[in-house]
Amino acid sequence: QVQLVESGGGLVQAGGSLRLSCAVSGSSFSINAMGWYRQAPGKKRELVADITSGGMTNYADSVKVRFTISAGNGNAMVWLQMNSLKPEDTAVYYCNVKGLRPGRPELFEYWGQGTQVAVSS
């Protein structure tokens, strides 16, 4: 089992910044990609940004330029730097890891427990 431990969420005013961190640990797991998703009350979960083990990044149009995803420590850490925050960024943010379990050909996903980000106007 892989564990994802998130930190860095909180309450900020519009225009402020937050940096989310996700620490990946646990059993053997070959990571293909890591990412951040978010879910606002009453809305479906959506991709915010992800990054492959090779460093390629992908962002939702709503956060492009403002947010930056990065990874390090041998893909044991993933961060989301959030700048110029807007009230519509308010949501629970979830860390996600996709990869391969030993001896299995199919991709598998792990999720963090979520961390609250609230942006006031």
Image: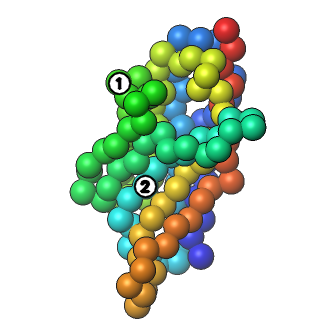
- The numbered dot on residue 65 is 1
Residue visible at 68% across and 53% down in the picture: 113
Q: Quadrant of residue 101?
A: bottom left
Say few, some or many: other residues with alpha carbon within 10 Å of mark 2 (under 14 / 14 to 19 / 20 or more): many
Q: Quadrant of residue 52?
A: bottom left
Q: Where is residue 41? Give x, y as percent.
A: 74, 36
Q: Quadrant of residue 112?
A: bottom right
Q: CA distance from mark 2 to mark 1?
A: 19 Å
Residue visible at 61% across and 46% down in the picture: 45
- The numbered dot on residue 34 is 2
Amino acid type, mark 2: Met
Which type of secondary structure does the marked residue at label 2 adopt? strand
Whether residue 48 is situated above or below residue 119 in the rendered picture: below
Q: Give the quarter of the figure containing the N terminus.
A: bottom right
Say few, some or many: other residues with alpha carbon within 10 Å of mark 1 (under 14 / 14 to 19 / 20 or more): few
Q: Where is residue 23? Give x, y as percent.
A: 53, 54
Residue ranking furthest to the bottom: 103
